[in-house]
Amino acid sequence: MGYGNDSDGGRDGSEFLEEKSCLMRGIGERERDNDRLKSGPWTEHIESVKGNVEVYQEVLKEHKRRLKSCRLEMVAIVPASSSASSSKPESCVVGVSDAQARPADADVEVDCLRDGRRAAHDK
């Protein structure tokens, strides 16, 4: 009778399994999208606007929208010290593949998607 936590955990667990199932179905698509995004005009565009914080944030939003269908998690690192007046933001993007989250280090400049993907697969 007193197993209220189990029913809550069941709901949380089923949501997790549903999410994992969706991720597993999308692996093939994700691999193709990753390969396409690793090198190409869109990645170069992201690199080219890094100097402008406001534009960079807008580009990241659009990049997240493009990646949403392949379920690749994007982590934007924006230290509290960064401001729109700084010449180069300390922001970077870390691509986390196969739903395997890894801690992002704000002190390390990560080359968009390429290094994030390589680091995730080198483990």
Image (spheres, rainbow, N blue to C red):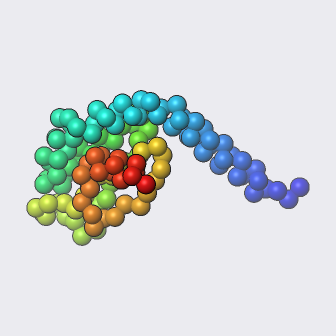
Q: Is residue 87 visible?
A: yes
Which residue: 27% across, 63% down? 108
Q: Which residue occupies the foreground of this view, 58 or 38? A: 38
Q: Is residue 22 above or below residue 7?
A: above
Which residue: 27% across, 67% down? 107
Q: Is residue 95 above or below residue 108?
A: above
Which quadrant of the figure contains the N terminus? bottom right
Q: Tell me where residue 81 sits by quadrant.
A: bottom left
Residue 52 located left or right of residue 111: left
- The residue most toward the front is 122
Which quadrant of the figure contains the C terminus? bottom left
Percent position of residue 55, x then y: 17, 48
Q: Which residue occupies the foreground of this view, 86 or 96? A: 96
Residue 122 located left or right of residue 52: right
Percent position of residue 118, x then y: 34, 49
Percent position of residue 5, x then y: 75, 57
Residue 113 located left or right of residue 69: left
